[in-house]
Amino acid sequence: MASFSEAREDPAHQLWTQIDDLHAGMLGIDGSGMHMQPMAPFADPTTNTIWFYTKDDTHVAQAVKPGTRAHFCVVGKHHDYHACLAGHIELRPDPTKIDEYWNSVVAAWYEGGKKDPHLTMLALHVDDAEIWVSTDSTLKFGWEIAKANLTGDKEPDVGLRRHLQFA
């Protein structure tokens, strides 16, 4: 469950923790005209980078050119956390990163393993994000809706939003 206090006090840490708990999010290449597609993220919070395995002959890899930007959207596994991250994306077949995040699930997609001739990685260098944390309590949600409808002077307090910028 997403914590309101962590979202207020350390939203960047919460963001990276939520990404670590994901199997997939939706990656979209800005200006490509393509729909967003599910991709498994591998987060490196020390560099504000999200790594993705892909093949160099996929539409998403071919859409990445120098200077390309992308968005990655996240829905937490309990549906009480949402985020949209943006940044510069590049093709980067970094053998160190390929090895660092390699696992049996990734291996299933690459016939040649780590030496697959089409294996590459995408590096999304996150510079901007918005997060939304909402209550997962039906009781709190119901109370806030009723209170807002009865008093008419305030919106329901069922969540919060934070904007993050990364260097």
Image: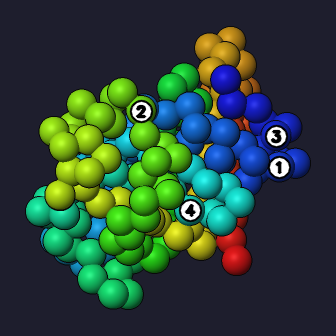
Measured as percent of width and height from the top left, residue 95 is found at 43, 59
**Could you say which disc has been placed on residue 10 in the image?**
1
Which of disc 4 and disc 3 is earlier in sequence? 3
- Picture quarter with the N terminus: top right
Which of disc 4 and disc 2 is earlier in sequence? 4
Mark 3 closeness class: few <14, some 14–19, many ≥20 residues within 10 Å: some
Q: Distance of mark 1 from mark 3, alpha carbons?
A: 5 Å
Mark 1 closeness class: few <14, some 14–19, many ≥20 residues within 10 Å: few
Q: Looking at the image, which residue is at 21% across and 37% down? A: 109
Residue marked by disc 3: 6
Callout 2 amino acid: Asn
Which of disc 3 and disc 2 is earlier in sequence? 3
Q: Looking at the image, which residue is at 72% across and 43% down? A: 14
**Could you say which disc has been placed on residue 103 in the image?**
2
Can residue 14 be seen here? The reply is yes
Q: Looking at the image, which residue is at 17% across and 58% down? A: 118
